[in-house]
Image: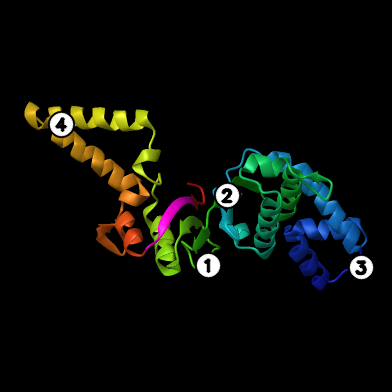
Amino acid sequence: MANYTAADIKALREKTGAGMMDVKKALDESDGDQTKAMEALRIKGLKGATKREGRSTSDGLVATSVEGGVGTMIELNSETDFVAKSEPFVKLSEEVLELAVANKADSAEALLAAETDGKPVSQFITESGASLGEKVELRRVGRVEGSKIASYLHRTNKDLPPQVGVLLAFEGDDETVAHDVAVHIAAMAPKYFSREDVPADLVENERRIAEDTAKNEGKPEQALPKIIEGRVNGFFKENCLLDQGFAKDPKQSVAKVLEAAGVKATGFLRYRVGA
């Protein structure tokens, strides 16, 4: 019988994230040698990684970094919240974020193709996921540049890492208002920065829907233009940051709140895990 203790099992489980029976089997096969057992688990984990390809990665976290006028955000996914809140997964997210910053990556594809320690980042993430016993996936990487960057991370569950992240680029000195707008973005989930950013074909489609709806409601022909315009404006107020009613004071638009504070927002990025 291999010479190892319960403490050895615990230590190896904490290092690898592997299950108890897998750890015991690896220690048995390696005669209690921790290094050889870890190598065996890594090999088995990597072999099993392909079996995890079809699994859904619906949990995970978002993480941000701000250096000067550049904000970087990643979304790293796992299969379960159990892994998402584990120390090894959180550490992995920190390492991936550092790589994103170092490589100035602005997309997941760009970062996955970059190299770290002589191998692709994609391989590094796959290997790390294997040791955790789950499929781990880098879903998104984004960058925001501006005079200043406000960052906000929100926990949807106090027991889990942040699952909503916001980066807001802005000009001006009122960092409190900038932070409040970042919190607003996290809560209200605008799809676009301003109405000018909404694709023209989408606006036309909204106009068509508004017109068809009004006609089906039997609205008088002469009233249609005003009704259509009102409903399209309603679409802008729901989906465009600057047109949205400010979360802390819905009677004012975000644009008005920023203007009153002498702050000019220039762009934003919002991630929610799985959304």
In the image, is residue 33 above or below residue 211? Answer: below
Which residue in the structure is indicated by mark 3?
Answer: 3
Which residue in the structure is indicated by mark 2?
Answer: 143
Relative to the observer, which residue lies in front, 228 or 144?
144
In the image, is residue 24 above or below residue 208? Answer: below
Q: Confirm whether the magenta stretch covers residue 68.
A: no
Which residue in the structure is indicated by mark 1?
Answer: 159
Number of other residues with Cα within 10 Å of mark 1, as a class: few under 14, some 14 to 19, many 20 or more: few
Q: Confirm whether the magenta stretch covers residue 268.
A: yes
Q: Identify the secondary structure beneath mark 2.
A: strand
Relative to the observer, which residue lies in front, 221 or 138?
221
Q: Main secondary structure of the magenta part?
A: strand
Identity of the amino acid at label 2? Answer: Arg
Number of other residues with Cα within 10 Å of mark 4, as a class: few under 14, some 14 to 19, many 20 or more: few
The residue at the point 36 percent across, 54 percent down is 188
Q: Which residues are magenta?
A: 262-269
Q: Identify the secondary structure beneath mark 4.
A: helix
- Mark 3 or mark 2, which is nearer the start of the sequence? 3
Q: Identify the secondary structure beneath mark 1.
A: loop
Query: Mark 4 to mark 2: distance in Å?
Result: 40 Å
In the image, is residue 96 above or below residue 54? Answer: below
The image quadrant of residue 55 is top right
- On screen, residue 73 versus residue 127, left or right, reads left
Which residue in the structure is indicated by mark 4?
Answer: 225
Total number of numbered labels?
4
